[in-house]
Image (tube, grey):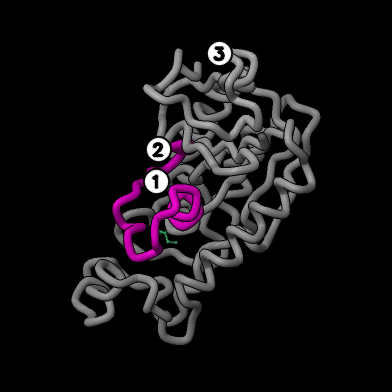
Amino acid sequence: MTTLLLARHGLTDLTGPVLAGRTPGVHLSEAGRAQAAALAGRVAGVRLDAIVSSPLERCRETAEAVAQGRETDVRVDDRFIECGYGEWTGRPLAELAKEPLWQVVQAHPSAVTFPGGESLAAMQQRAVAAVREWNRTLGSKGVYLVCSHGDVIKAIVADALGLHLDQFQRITADPAALTVIRYAPLRPFVLRLNDMGELRLPEDSEEKDGGENITGSDAAVGGGPGTT
Ligand SMILES: O=C(O)[C@@H](CO)OP(=O)(O)O
């Protein structure tokens, strides 16, 4: 059961007022650097077989903070880059909210292609493909962290929940928050969502359950004895 820790990068000066997108040179702010350091502390007790990042600076800086003091180098995977927002890139959110496409992004995101940019569906497809490939590479005992962007994380979570992309705005991914997904052979389990607490990973369930969980994929009827 490969375990994926999905971390959104820490705050930048643009996070909130402006859609930074793929704008180069957007670094963590002082608050963002503090968030990245705190994130590193929250996962300090977790073995990480790989630390992977979007190529954008704010993610790499967050991932580097997690990698500090570990023997694992940050590996960049372009498939975790921010959605290509095209002409929306660098524009104030307050202005974008008045565009007709904004409502479609809210209500029917699977139909959205940003002008001059990428579709949300294509973004989900390449990010989920990257997760599947890392899962295969690291194997069933692998534990890895991916630092990426809000919409990318929400799209990966939607896939793990079996939720259509049109529902992905129901999911939240805050700066420096962690989402944890364990991929068992028959289904993913979303263990944590948008979490800001210290992380301890559950043992493989066959060690803790009543012995009925042959593949590690079964959900305990009634909820079981707890995962942490
Ligand atoms: O500016 C943002 O809010 C965006 C868009 O790039 O997402 P993130 O901060 O996760 O990169």
Between 118 and 2, the one nearer to me in the picture: 2
- Contact, mark 2 vs mark 1 (Cβ under 8 Å): yes
What span is in magenta?
Answer: 154-179
Label 3 vs 1, first from the N-terminus: 1
Between 116 and 25, the one nearer to me in the picture: 116
Amino acid type indicated by mark 3 = Gly
Query: Which residue was labeled with disc 1?
Result: 173
The quadrant where ligand 1 appears is bottom left
Query: Which residue was labeled with disc 2?
Result: 194
Query: Which residue was labeled with disc 3?
Result: 210
Give the residue at x 63% y 20%.
206
Visible in this render: residue 2? yes
Give the residue at x 58% y 28%.
40
> For the residues marked 2 and 1, what is the alpha-carbon distance in whole angstroms?
5 Å
> For the residues marked 3 and 2, what is the alpha-carbon distance in whole angstroms?
30 Å
Please check the rendered image and state whether residue 156 is part of the magenta-colored stretch, yes or no.
yes
